[in-house]
Image (spheres, grey):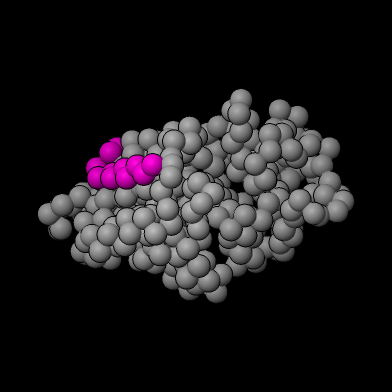
């Protein structure tokens, strides 16, 4: 068996970043101010703090502004909605990200839905999801979009292939399943109540692991030559697939780290730039 192809997310992210620098410069020249991504974080979840910092650094690299709105852990739904409404009305803000997860007292979906669709850079509004599902113009979830971009960049045709998505979260599993379906894959979505999971995965030409459990997908679940997309990132810098043992069985795989993650950040910024371009170009 030939060596599997490494789906290098860092490489793709660097290509997107180079393109975005030019596009941001064009928007800035036309508008007289830089495009901006506003990130709202509630509380001090360590992983969320890290992600927000990484997104802010990426914005700076492409020449954008990054606004970090940090709210206390005890913030209410109404208080958060008020912040989102102000950002919706701010013409210098082109993308809004509400960092997931939020504390339990907050109605997260209500707050997602309050983000104006034209600024919904992470595709979390139900309006965005519905339009995306129907193949209409819409912003998409940054991680699902990054997965599709990786497959396209490395020449992996999903049409007619059997894809298994493990995880059904509204911000990852469900939207990536819809994007794969729209690309003519045959899609099975598995979750915590799925029976005979290993047997289902063994049929897959493409496996997308988005379950949030370290090394959950075992090597002996993988069909020879399958494409492995590991969207997980867990303690110890490991994903949701046991890549140490499963990668050798695959035809291609995303490493962890360095696979889906870097592209996700750039896709979030790219959609913010698209929003800015629509406003000024």
Q: Pick the quarter of the image with the N terminus.
A: top right
**Nearest to the observer: residue 53 or residue 26:** 53
Residue 9 position in % (x across, y down): 51, 39
* 182 with respect to 103 (left or right): right
Could you tell me which quadrant the C terminus lies in? bottom left
* Number of marks present in the image shown: 0
Residue 162 horizontal/vertical position (percent) = 74, 58
Residue at point 15%, 58% (across, down): 31
Is the residue 220 above or below the residue 102 in the image? above
- The magenta segment: 60-72
Who is closer to the viewer here, 12 or 245? Answer: 245
Q: Left or right: 166 with respect to 233?
A: right
Q: Nearer the viewer, residue 41 or 154?
A: 41
Residue in view at x 28 percent, y 44 percent: 66
Q: Does residue 57 appear in the picture of this structure?
A: yes
The x, y position of residue 126, in whole percent, is 50, 67
Whether residue 249 is visible, yes or no, is no
Check the image and name the residue furthest to the top: 236
Q: Is 64 colored magenta in this rendering?
A: yes
Residue drawn at x 44%, y 36% is 44
Tell me if residue 197 comes above or below residue 85 in the rendering: above
Q: Nearer the viewer, residue 80 or 123?
A: 80
Does the stretch in magenta take in 27? no
In the figure, is residue 12 to the left or right of 219? left
Q: Residue at x 32, y 50 (%)?
A: 38
């Amino acid at each position: 068996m030939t060596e599997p192809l490494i789906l290098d997310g860092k490489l793709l992210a660097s290509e997107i970043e180079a393109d975005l620098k030019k596009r941001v410069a064009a928007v800035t020249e036309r508008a007289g101010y830089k495009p901006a991504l506003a990130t709202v974080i509630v509380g001090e979840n360590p992983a969320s703090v890290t992600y927000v910092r990484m997104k802010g650094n990426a914005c700076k690299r492409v020449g954008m502004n990054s606004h970090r709105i940090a709210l206390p852990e005890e913030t209410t739904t109404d208080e958060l909605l008020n912040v989102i409404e102000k950002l919706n009305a701010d013409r210098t803000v082109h993308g809004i990200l509400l960092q997931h997860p939020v504390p339990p007292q907050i109605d997260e979906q209500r707050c997602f839905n309050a983000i104006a669709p034209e600024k919904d850079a992470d595709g979390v509004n139900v309006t965005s999801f519905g339009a995306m599902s129907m193949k209409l113009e819409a912003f998409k979830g940054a991680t699902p979009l990054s997965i599709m971009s990786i497959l396209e960049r490395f020449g992996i045709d999903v049409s007619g292939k059997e894809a298994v998505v493990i995880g059904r979260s509204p911000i990852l599993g469900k939207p990536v399943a819809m994007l794969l379906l729209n690309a003519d894959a045959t899609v099975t979505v598995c979750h915590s109540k799925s029976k005979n999971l290993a047997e289902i995965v063994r049929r897959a030409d493409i496996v997308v692991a988005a379950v949030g459990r370290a090394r959950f997908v075992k090597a002996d679940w993988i069909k020879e030559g399958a494409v492995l997309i590991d969207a997980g990132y867990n303690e110890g810098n490991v994903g949701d697939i046991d890549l140490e043992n499963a990668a050798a069985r695959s035809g291609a795989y995303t490493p962890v780290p360095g696979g889906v993650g870097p592209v996700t950040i750039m896709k979030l910024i790219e959609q913010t730039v698209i929003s800015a371009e629509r406003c000024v170009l």
